[in-house]
Image: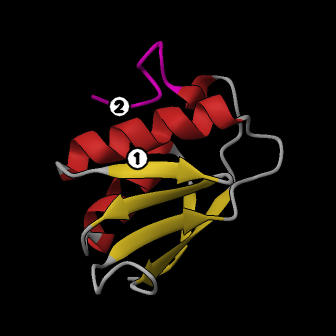
Amino acid sequence: MNPADDPDSPQRLWKMGRVVLQRETAHRGGKTVIVVKDFATHLPVQVIEKVAKRLRAACGCGGTVRDKRIEIQGDQAARVRAVLEAEGFEVRGLK
């Protein structure tokens, strides 16, 4: 299903903009997380939380939203990138 066709999709209301993917392990007991950061300043936290929920569901893992950054558990950069691009974001950073 195309996210633009979904009535709950934030893409119908907002221009999504560019985000950056980053892999982090610091202060996490050696566990890897993928951080999605640098969301457009006009996006409210509710939209970022909705995107985070879709990422967690697509990756089948946990995650959280902190300070307008999404942290997804595990080293799943390719899946995260695919979901974000489907949501309408231009994705930079990890390949």
Q: Which residues are magenta?
A: 1-9
Residue at left 47%, top 28%?
Answer: 4
Residue furthest left as drawn:
60
Label 2 environment density (alpha carbons within 10 Å; few <14, some 14–19, many ≥20): few
Q: Quadrant of residue 11?
A: top right
Q: Secondary structure at mark 2?
A: loop
Q: Amino acid at mark 1?
A: Ala
Residue labelled with disc 2: 2
In the picture, measured across the screen, residue 52 lies left or right of residue 58, that is right
The image quadrant of residue 25 is bottom left
Was residue 82 drawn as part of the magenta stretch in this picture?
no
Query: Dot 1: within a 10 Å radius of its alpha carbon, few (fewer than 14), some, or many (20 or more) residues?
Result: some
Residue at left offset 26%, top offset 62%: 79
Amino acid type, callout 2: Asn
Which residue is under mark 1?
Answer: 86
Q: Is residue 92 above or below residue 89?
A: below
In this image, 7 relative to 10: left or right?
Answer: left
